[in-house]
Amino acid sequence: MAFFATAGRIGATLVAMASTRLELAAVEFQEDARRLLGHLAWTLLAVFLAAGALLLAALFVIAIFWDTYRLQAVGGMAVLFGFVAGIILLKVRASMNAEAPLLSATLAELRDDIDYLRQGVAHHAAQHAGAGDE
């Protein structure tokens, strides 16, 4: 009977730990989703405004050089925009690689739980091995 009671307590503890970790994962996922939507909204606004500004700047430069170097002005603006777009893409990629992985706090807690359980099993086995020596 003591074995079943102990197994029941261990099972209840494991279920409670899993429940807590799932709640943490849900909260963490929700925070990441909200943060991502916020970034997306601001990014879309910035892209829209930047596209308008770039179009007007390009038209301004082309208009200035219309009589003398119109093709060079158009080509220069295209090269400039392509270069800046490449730099932006590299920065975005670096920023995304630098962020913590999704649910990193939950995974860290689960690793801590596994280590704790392994230490408990090892400690329990060492106690029983020591009791058998006497």
Image (tube, rainbow, N blue to C red):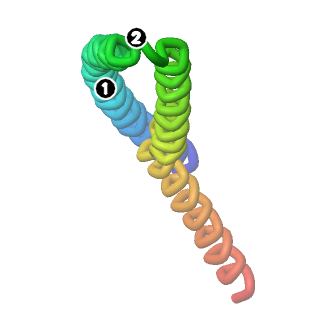
Q: Secondary structure at mark 2?
A: loop
2 or 1: mark nearer the eye: 2
Question: Which quarter of the picture shows residue 20?
Answer: top left
Image quadrant occupied by the N terminus: top right
For image coordinates 62% across by 76% down, the residue present is: 127
Q: Which mark is residue 133?
A: none
Q: Nearer the viewer, residue 103 or 88?
A: 88
The kind of residue on which mark 2 rests is Trp
The kind of residue on which mark 1 rests is His
How many numbered callouts? 2
For image coordinates 45% across by 44% down, the residue present is: 99
Res. 51 visible in picture = no
Q: Looking at the image, is mark 2 or mark 1 earlier in the sequence?
A: 1
Image quadrant occupied by the C terminus: bottom right
Q: Secondary structure at mark 1?
A: helix
User: Which residue corresponds to mark 1?
Assistant: 39
Res. 66 visible in picture = yes
Q: Residue furthest bottom?
A: 134
User: Which residue corresponds to mark 2?
Assistant: 66
**Image location (x, y in percent) of residue 101:** 50, 41
**Image location (x, y in percent) of residue 123:** 59, 72
Question: Which quarter of the picture shows residue 61?
Answer: top left
- Relative to 9, say whether 24 is above or below: above
For image coordinates 64% across by 68% down, the residue present is: 122
On the rendered structure, is 38 left or right of 25? left
Question: Which quarter of the picture shows residue 24?
Answer: top left
**Image location (x, y in percent) of residue 37:** 31, 19
Q: Nearer the viewer, residue 65 or 22?
A: 65
